[in-house]
Amino acid sequence: MHSSTKKISAGVAAVTLVTSLMVATTPASAAEMSTSAMPAVCASLPKTTTESDGIPGPVFWSRLQCMASMDSERPYRGPIDGVMGPNSWLGVTARLKVGGYFEGPLSNANNAGSVFALQRWALDHNRPIGALNQWSKPTYRAVAWCLNRSF
């Protein structure tokens, strides 16, 4: 084998290795984020209209609680009632951590870190989000779009 052929083969092997490592560290898509252990009520929830109007209501928050109840290190186990309390937010951040969207210690609040993780999730699905780290109509629409397609 000529030296130039060996160099090309080594280069192809290096590119293949780097590509496989990049694929392995990409955050999980919505389809890869399993729905096991989700409460049965979640399957019967209607789609949220927040996707079109940007105004969060009880269905939006209930769907967010359903997402929070999916498998994670700290899944939400409370009622799916659309009332977001500390345990709901812990479940949201824990679930987003599974997908690689939330970093650091889990949060039990609707704060900039939680919103930013939801925005990263929406951006991963090519949804426009508006201003970073804060709720806005575009962010509500983007998150609702993801929630409407998650289960």
Image (cartoon, grey):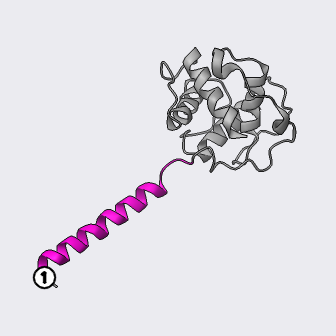
User: Which residues make up the magenta segment?
Assistant: 2-28
Q: Is residue 7 above or below residue 36?
A: below
Q: Where is residue 51 shown, x and y percent of the image?
A: 65, 23
Q: Which residue is most to the bottom? A: 1
Expressed as whole percent of the image width and height from the top left, the position of residue 146 reads: 63, 33
The quadrant of the image that shows the C terminus is top right
Is 50 above or below relative to 147? above
Query: Is 8 inside the magenta-drawn segment?
Result: yes
* Quarter location, residue 49: top right
Secondary structure beneath label 1 = loop
Give the quadrant of residue 22. bottom left
Q: Is residue 93 magenta?
A: no
The answer to whether residue 146 is left or right of residue 101 is right
Q: Is residue 136 visible?
A: no
Image coords of residue 57 (percent x, y):
75, 17
Foreground of the two, 128 or 36: 128
On screen, residue 1 above or below 68: below
Q: Is residue 75 left or right of residue 79?
A: left
Task: Work out whether residue 3 can be spotted.
Answer: yes
Observer-nearest of 33 and 96: 33
The residue drawn where x is 67% and y is 33% is 147
Q: Amino acid type of disc 1? A: His
Magenta region, main secondary structure? helix
Q: How many marks?
A: 1
Locate residue 122: give its quadrant.
Answer: top right
Question: In what quadrant of the picture does the N terminus appear?
Answer: bottom left
Per the image, the residue denoted by label 1 is: 2
Residue 135: horizontal and vertical position, in percent? 58, 18
Image side of residue 144 versus residue 27, left or right: right
Q: Which residue occupies the foreground of this view, 104 or 128?
A: 128
